Amino acid sequence: MAGKRKWPTGITERQLADGTRRFQLAFSFRGKPIRKLMKHEVSAQNAKYLSRLRGTILQEIEDGEFL
């Protein structure tokens, strides 16, 4: 990778041992950091999708609906 790309807040790019690049989704739940490695390939479109998903998760946490 030539340079680090800036992804939306809570979305980071990870390179696995086999060279595959995946996204990691991060948020806090009940005061604990949650990091979930996603199966989505690294792309701007998937980053946008995961950013919206993270927003939904944060809203559900705030509303007390997240399990």
Image: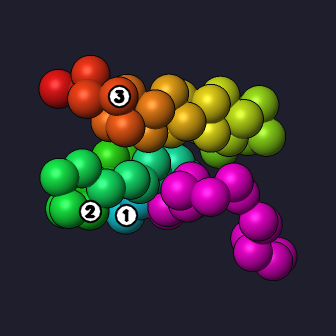
Residue at figure coordinates x 78%, y 66% from the top left: 5
Q: What kind of element bears circle 3? A: helix
Q: Is residue 33 magenta?
A: no
Q: Which residues are magenta?
A: 1-15
Tell me where residue 41 appears, x and y as whole percent: 59, 37
Q: Residue furthest front?
A: 63
Does 11 sit left or right of 65 as displayed?
Answer: right
Of the pair 62 and 5, the residue shown nearer to us: 62
- Please state, as top left, top right, bottom left or bottom right, where the C terminus lies in the image: top left
From what the image shows, is residue 11 above or below residue 56?
below
Question: Badges 3 and 1: C-beta atoms under 8 Å apart?
Answer: no
Of the pair 49 and 19, the residue shown nearer to us: 49
Residue at image mark 1: 17
Does 29 sit left or right of 43 as displayed?
Answer: left
From what the image shows, is residue 58 above or below residue 32?
above
Residue at image mark 2: 33
Tell me where residue 34 appears, x and y as whole percent: 27, 54
Q: CA distance from mark 1 to mark 2?
A: 23 Å
Q: CA distance from mark 2 to mark 3?
A: 18 Å
Residue at image mark 3: 63
